[in-house]
Amino acid sequence: MSSPRATTLVELVAGLAAERPEALAVRIERRRRGEDVSCEALFAGARVAAARLRAAGLAAGDRVQLLFPTDRAAIEGFFGVLLAGGVPVPAAPLTSLRAEDVALRGEALRNQALDAGASFCLAPGRHRELLQGQLAGAGVAVLACEGEGSPLPEADLAAPAPEDTAFLQYTSGSTGAPKGVALTHANVLANVAAIEDAFLPLVEGELTLSWLPLFHDMGLIGALLVSLYGRVPVALAAPADFVRDPGWFLKVASRLRATISVMPNFAFGYAVRRVPAEAVGELNLAPLRTILNGAEPIDVEALRRFEEHFAPAGLRPGAVRAVYGLAESALAVTFARPGPCVIDRIDADALERDGRAVPAPAGARVRSLVSVGRPVATQEVRIAGPDDDPLGEREVGEVCVRGPSVMAGYFRQPAATAKALRAGWLRTGDFGYLAGGELYLVGREKETIRRYGRSYHPQDIEGQLARLEGVEAALAFGVEVDDDVRVVLVVATRLDAAPAREALEQRVRHRVGRAFALPVDAVALVPPQAIPKSTSGKLRRQACRAFYAHRRGARPPSGRYRVVSAQGVPGDLAEALTRALEDAAARARAAEA
C-alpha cells in the first residue's frame, strides 16, 4: 500500500484545493437539480464555517455536533470544524418537525451532547430555534452555517497532529446504548488508504454515487472521505430519496455513469421489490463496476435476486462486493475480492450445536454464508474464544481486529474501552470464523438466541422470513421467561384482512419451524416501515426485546424500553408496533396459562 497523501483531514482538504482547485469534489444530487462543488469551493466554504465557529468562541478540542441533512453545508461544516480546531460529532438531523418527533430526537441529541461534552451544534438555520430549545439543558450553543461570510485566513487554520482526535463517530446503538468512538486522523487516513488500495487501480472517469447518510461511517468515510482521498468525484443523494424511489437513484447512476456505490444489504432486496422489470430496461448500469455491500449481515438470496433483476440493465455479474467493518475500526476490516460471491455451505446442526462451521454433507440441513473477504491492507483478523484464546480454522468465535485503523477508545468511557481493547486487539462483538483465509460472519453475541442447547442467529431467521410472500421485513429476538427462552418475531406486512393475516402468521411459524426446528412463541404483525431501526438503518432488536420482556413480565430489562424512543419510527407507526408487541405478549401469556 502506498504512503498516505495526507497525514490529517485538514491536510487532505487543503491539499485538494491547492492541487486540483477546479476539479469536481462533490455533487449534491437532488430530484430537481444538482449542485457541483469544486475542490477550491469546498475548502473556501469550510473556511467560512471555521471563521464563524472561531467568532462564536470555539476553542481547540471543543466538540461540535453536526445536524445537517446530506447537503453542501454538511460537508463544509464537517471540514469547517476541523479547520477551526474542533472535533466534529456527526449526528442524525431532524427529519420531522412534529412536536412529538422533535421531542424524541431532542432527548437523543441531548444525551449525545452530554456524553460528548459538546459546546456547539451546527444545524440548518430553519432548525436553529427548535434545536436550541431541545439542547438548552446540555449547555450547547446552536449555530447556523449557511450563507456567505469571510473565510478564516489560512495562517489561522488549525494544524492538528496525526494522533489527535479527528472526530467522534457514534455507534448506531443497534445492540445497546450508543458510544462515541474516538478516531484519530491517523486512524481514519490509514483506513481510507486501505480502502482505496482495495479498489486499485482507480482510473480516469471514476465516480462514486452514494445515498448513505453522512452521519454514518459508511457514508462519511466509505463514500465521501475515500473519494476525496482518491481524487474521485462523489455524488451524494439524500437517504429519503432512495427510500422513496430506488428507481430514481439508479437512473441517477445511469445518467452520471457512476462506477462505484455503497449500500447496506436491505437495499438490494428493496430495490428489486420497488423497481419493476419494465423499468429496468431504461437503466444503464454497465459502468457500475463495484457496489459495496456492508453495514448489515449479507443475504445470499437477496444478492442473487438483485443481480438477476438488473442484469437487463447491464449490471455486471459479481459487481456486488461483500465487505465487513465497524466504527471501532474506523470502517473497513475486510473486502471480498472482485467477482462472484464466495459462498460457504455449512452444516447448520454442527454450527448450532458445536460452534463449528463444517462443510455440509449430503442430506444435512444447510446454512449458506457469504464470505466478507480478507483483511484490507494493514488490518489483521483473528477469531478468539471467551478467554481470548485464538481459535482454529472453521471454529466459531468472536472476530478480533488489530491495526492502525483501530480506535483510540470510546470517548470518556475507560471501562468500555478496556473491555473492547485487549492486548492490542479489538473485540468486535461479532461472531464468525475463518476458512481458507476468508472471513464469514454468523451473528452478534448480544443478539444470539440460545434455546435447547443450540445457538440461532436472528439474521438467519429474518432472511428466511423475507422470502415469504406478504412479508416486507422481519425482526427476531429471544426473551428469557421462567428459565426458558421465548422466540418472538416482528413481521411487517401490507396485508389488512384478518384471514390473510392469520394465514401469514401460520406460514411464518411453519417456515421457522421447518428451517430451524425452532418453535415460535409470539408473532407481532406490524405495518411496513414500523420495524424499528437505528439512525443508520440497523434493526433495533435489543430495544424490541427489552420492551417485550417488560410487557411479558420477564426479567427486568436494562435501560430504556419504550419502543417509540429514538427509533426513527413515525408516531402512528410506533403506536402500531407497541400495540402489536403488547398483543403478542398477552397472547403468549394466555397460551401458557
Image (cartoon, rainbow, N blue to C red):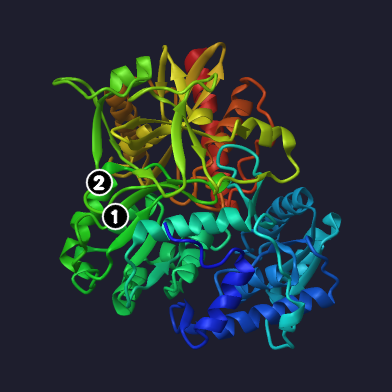
- The disc placed on residue 353 is none
Along the line of sight, which residue is nearer the eye, 69 or 102? 69
Name the side, left or right, on which 129 lies relative to 531. right
Along the line of sight, which residue is nearer the eye, 158 or 167? 158
Image spot of residue 311 (x, y percent): 18, 61
Name the secondary structure under disc 1.
strand
Along the line of sight, which residue is nearer the eye, 107 or 358? 358
Along the line of sight, which residue is nearer the eye, 363 or 6? 6
* C-alpha gap between disc 2 and disc 1: 8 Å
Name the secondary structure under disc 2.
loop
Residue that sits furthest to the front in the current view: 3
Q: Residues within 10 Å of mark 1 (few under 14, many from 20)?
A: many
Quarter of the rendering occupied by the N terminus: bottom left
Is residue 145 in view?
no
- Whether tag 2 and tag 1 are in contact, CB under 8 A, the answer is yes
Q: Residues within 10 Å of mark 2 (few under 14, many from 20)?
A: many
Query: Is residue 116 shown above or below 465?
Result: below
- Badge 2 amino acid: Cys
Query: Is residue 73 shown above or below 473?
Result: below
Q: Residue at x 72, y 32 (%)?
A: 415
Image spot of residue 457 (x, y percent): 41, 29
Image spot of residue 40 (x, y percent): 56, 85
Q: Residue at x 49, y 71 (%)?
A: 228
According to the picture, the residue beneath numbered tag 2 turns out to be 341
Image spot of residue 261 (x, y percent): 37, 63
Comes first in the chain, label 2 or label 1: 1
Is residue 21 in view?
yes
Name the side, left or right, on which 236 lies relative to 404. left
Q: Residue at x 46, y 84 (%)?
A: 23
Image quadrant assignment for residue 585: top right
According to the picture, the residue beneath numbered tag 1 turns out to be 320
